């Protein structure tokens, strides 16, 4: 069972580049992926508008 914590840059790339098959396959290869609260707040803070914020929250 593979468990990993991911940092903000990985989450941003994962959200932005869903067509990047190598990155998506890498992240999806783990059984459990953890994102801590600081990373979540960084993602919310970096949203450019409400549409982007809602996109982040849904993922």
Image (tube, rainbow, N blue to C red):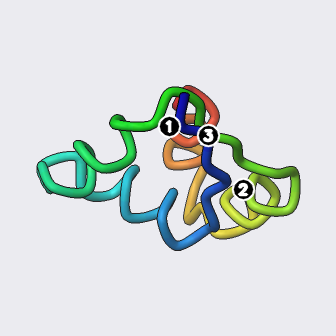
Question: Looking at the image, which residue is at 37% across and 64% down?
Answer: 13
Q: Which residue is mark 2?
A: 44
Residue 5 is labelled as none
Residue that carries the numbered disc 3 in the rendered image: 3
Q: Residue at x 15, y 55 (%)?
A: 22
User: Mark number for residue 55?
Assistant: 1
For marks 2 and 3 on the same chain, the one whose residue lies earlier in the sequence: 3
Q: Residue at x 63, y 66 (%)?
A: 7
Q: Is residue 18 above or below residue 44?
A: above
Which is nearer the eye, 52 or 37? 37
Residue nearer the viewer, 27 or 51: 27
Mark 1 crowd level (few <14, some 14–19, many ≥20, 10 Å Cα): few
- Mark 3: few/some/many CA within 10 Å (<14, 14-19, 20+): few
Give coordinates of residue 20: x percent, y percent.
15, 56
Mark closer to the observer (2, 3): 3
> Residue at image x 69%, y 42%?
34
Q: CA distance from mark 2 to mark 3?
A: 24 Å
Please tell me whether mark 3 sits on a helix, a strand or a loop: strand
């Amino acid at each position: 069972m593979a468990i990993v914590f991911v940092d903000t840059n990985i989450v941003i790339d994962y959200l932005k580049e869903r067509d990047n098959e190598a990155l998506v396959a890498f992240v999806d290869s783990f059984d459990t992926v953890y994102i801590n609260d600081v990373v979540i707040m960084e993602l919310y803070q970096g949203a450019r508008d409400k549409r982007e914020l809602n996109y982040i929250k849904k993922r």
